[in-house]
Amino acid sequence: MFVFVQGSINLITKALAAVGCKMQLLPDPTAVHYHLPDGLSVRVHRKFEDFLVELTGYFPHEKEGISQFYNECWKVFNSLNSLELKSLEEPLYLFGQFFKKPLECLTLAYYLPQNAGDIARKYIKDPNLLCFIDAECFIVSTVNALQTPMINASMVLCDRHFGGINYPVGGVGGIAKNLAKGLVDYGGTISYKANVTDIILENEKAVGVRLSDGRQFYAKKIISNATRWDTFGKLLRTEKLPPEEKNFQRLYVKAPSFLSIHMGVKEEVLPLDTDCHHFVLEDDWARLEEPYGSIFLSIPTVLDSSLAPEGHHILHIFTSAWIDDWKGLSQKDYNIKKEAVADEIVNRLEKTLFPGLKEAITFKEVGTPKTHMRFLARDNGTYGPIPQKNPKGLLGMPFNTTGVDGLYCVGDSCFPGQGVIAVAFSGIMCAHRVAADIGKHVFQGYIIDI
């Protein structure tokens, strides 16, 4: 799901605009359609009020608790959305924002160490409704509500209603293509098929990178968008792990990866009122976080039929999986297992959503955690960091600067963590921090020397 909305956290649109790009968008009337145990089928409608009506229809005895929990989410979201989001490591910015918006800053400080599950339990008692809140958080962070920081949950659970989910015409790949084109148009250079193997250090300062073909590039500042495990375990050849990295690895572990299935199917197998995004956990709440337990499904052709040949739909199906399940297999056994696991997932979707799905398949391609590791260059193909135990909100999440002079990290293993909005925020923060550190500052959209 990709969110193009109004307000301060409309970061993808802002990033595109910064390089002179704008995309045509299609509104999605339903952010996600849940298919959950005990026949719980909930659509998260674009209008927040419609979503509340549908959810309280299943839990009328929790009407007040539902309203109170989501109202707290809106407090966080509205505070974030009122601020100019930049680096929290830049003192001038922090003082300026606090001076302009003291109440909003204090609100965010209050929720910073809190998790969504603890807030939910203040107002909600029904165990099945609390499981639903777990599912809401799982699609944000791949963990339950008790392990999901309240700020992260609020960003996503409210953003989807504030401006709604809007899908880019031509597919989400257009976001990267437009950003790349804009960077080049503005004088930047992008090197493709350039595999970085080392971060070059001189006098304990990061000064460049070395590629697998031996080429070296040098710069004033080095930014790594690899995970912190890859950055400090593979790219940086140093015997000493900086203290903040030790603390990060003490508090967080690698999330599982995913098994992904991309399929082309005949359009008649999908009902005309099919939603674009689905989350399926059809029989047992206990399987929410288990490998292959929950199924994510995206059908972009519901919104943009031009993405597939006439008379067909595209299905992107994915479910969490650990790389250990795929190690030590011969190529033959690996291929057999891929097909067997994929068939089981398709069978579940056929039984729950789309009768006749298997016979309607015209194309199928399966990727495993090993695929994610190879093509995304992420340790074990991990989706990102998850807390070892219930965290104190976002307090343990490191920022963009590191213990190595000249080196910055960006992405989901930096504050504020996983999710499209959170990672975009990490990028904005890092750009601001680097600009300040090299003696430049952003003023009304322009970079000026200071």
Image (cartoon, rainbow, N blue to C red):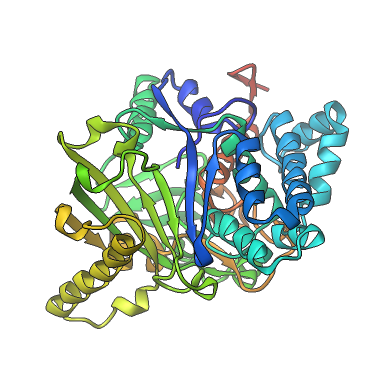
**Residue 338 falls in which quadrant of the image?**
bottom left
Judging depth in this view, the residue of 320 and 180 nearest the camera is 320
Q: Residue 128, percent across and down?
A: 63, 66
Query: In which quadrant will I find the N terminus?
Result: top left
Query: In which quadrant will I find the C terminus?
Result: top right
Looking at the image, residue 103 lies above or below residue 285: above
**Residue 378 falls in which quadrant of the image?**
bottom left
User: Residue at 23% across / 42% down in the picture?
Assistant: 313
Judging depth in this view, the residue of 415 and 139 nearest the camera is 139
Q: Residue 118, percent across and down?
A: 76, 62
Q: Across the whole image, how many numbered discs are drawn on residues? A: 0
Please say whether residue 401 is visible from this viewpoint.
no
Q: Residue 257, percent across and down?
A: 40, 65
338 left or right of 236? Answer: left
Judging depth in this view, the residue of 93 and 280 nearest the camera is 280
Looking at the image, residue 325 lies above or below residue 384: below
Direction bottom: furthest residue: 328
User: Residue at 74% across / 42% down in the picture?
Assistant: 76
444 left or right of 323? Answer: right
User: Residue at 69% across / 49% down in the picture?
Assistant: 151
User: Residue at 27% across / 66% down in the picture?
Assistant: 347
109 left or right of 164? Answer: right
Judging depth in this view, the residue of 349 and 222 nearest the camera is 349
Please say whether residue 8 is visible from this viewpoint.
yes
Q: Residue 266, percent across and down?
A: 17, 45
